[in-house]
Every structure is written in C-alpha cells, then in structure tokens.
Amino acid sequence: MSADNDVSFSTYDETSGSKLAQKAKEAPFVPIGIAGFAAIVAYGLYKLKSRGDTKMSVHLIHMCVGAQGFVVGAMTVGMLYSMYREYWAKPKP
C-alpha cells in the first residue's frame, strides 16, 4: 500500500463541545429537558430538609415523577416542533 491512498480524518475531528452544540441545534428541546430534570432534582434536594412528616420514600417518588414528567413533556414538545418544522413550515416546491 502506498502512502498516497491514506485518508486523513483530520477534517472529521470534532470536540465534544461542538458535537453538543450541533445536537442542540438539531433538537433544541433535549438540552431544555436535561436542564429541567437537573433543576427539579436540585429543588428536591433543597426541599429534602423541610419535608415535614412526609416519609423519605414518598418525597423521592414525588421528585422522580416530577423530573420524569418534565423530560417526557420536553420530548413531546420537541417532537411536535420537529413535525411542524418538517411537514408544515417546509416551503412547498
């Protein structure tokens, strides 16, 4: 094999930040879902001290359901947005 046939992949090198920015541009509601999940978890940890008579397991289940609900909602809105962009907002030839 000669050295002339070697393919350079240097044009395909991407950093993780550029990959994340590209994915966020393609699906903008994924980072929103991740941020909402993190916010609900942080809020749940903050409220953990002042939960009163509520059992720990009940408090954690409520926080888990809230965080999952936010992520599912963000995914649904993102899917509807992408369907709108692909089917209705696309210019007709």
Image (cartoon, rainbow, N blue to C red):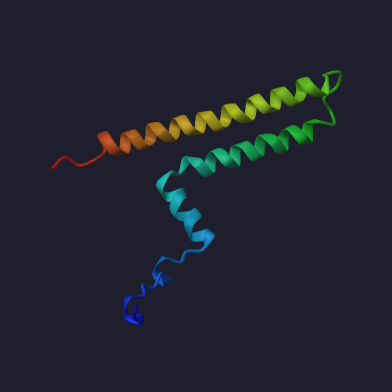
Q: Give the left or right position of residue 36, taking residue 57 as reference.
A: left
Q: Give the left or right position of residue 63, taking residue 82 as reference.
A: right
Q: Position of residue 52 (x, y in %)?
A: 85, 22
1 and 24: which is toward the camera: 1
* Residue drawn at the location 70% of the way across and 23% of the way down: 62
* Residue drawn at the location 35% of the way across and 77% of the way down: 1
Q: Give the left or right position of residue 50, taking residue 25 as reference.
A: right
The correct choice, above or below, for 5 with respect to 25 in the image is: below
Q: Position of residue 86 (x, y in %)?
A: 29, 38
Task: Give the position of the C terminus as an image quadrant.
Answer: top left
The correct choice, above or below, for 82 with respect to 15 in the image is: above
Q: Position of residue 2 (x, y in %)?
A: 34, 81
Residue at the extreme front: 1
* Residue drawn at the location 81% of the way across and 31% of the way down: 48
The correct choice, above or below, for 3 with respect to 64 in the image is: below
88 and 3: which is toward the camera: 3
Total numbered labels: 0
Residue at the extreme left: 93
Q: Give the left or right position of residue 19, taking residue 90 as reference.
A: right
* Residue drawn at the location 48% of the way across and 33% of the way down: 75
Q: Position of residue 57 (x, y in %)?
A: 79, 22
The quadrant in which residue 63 appears is top right
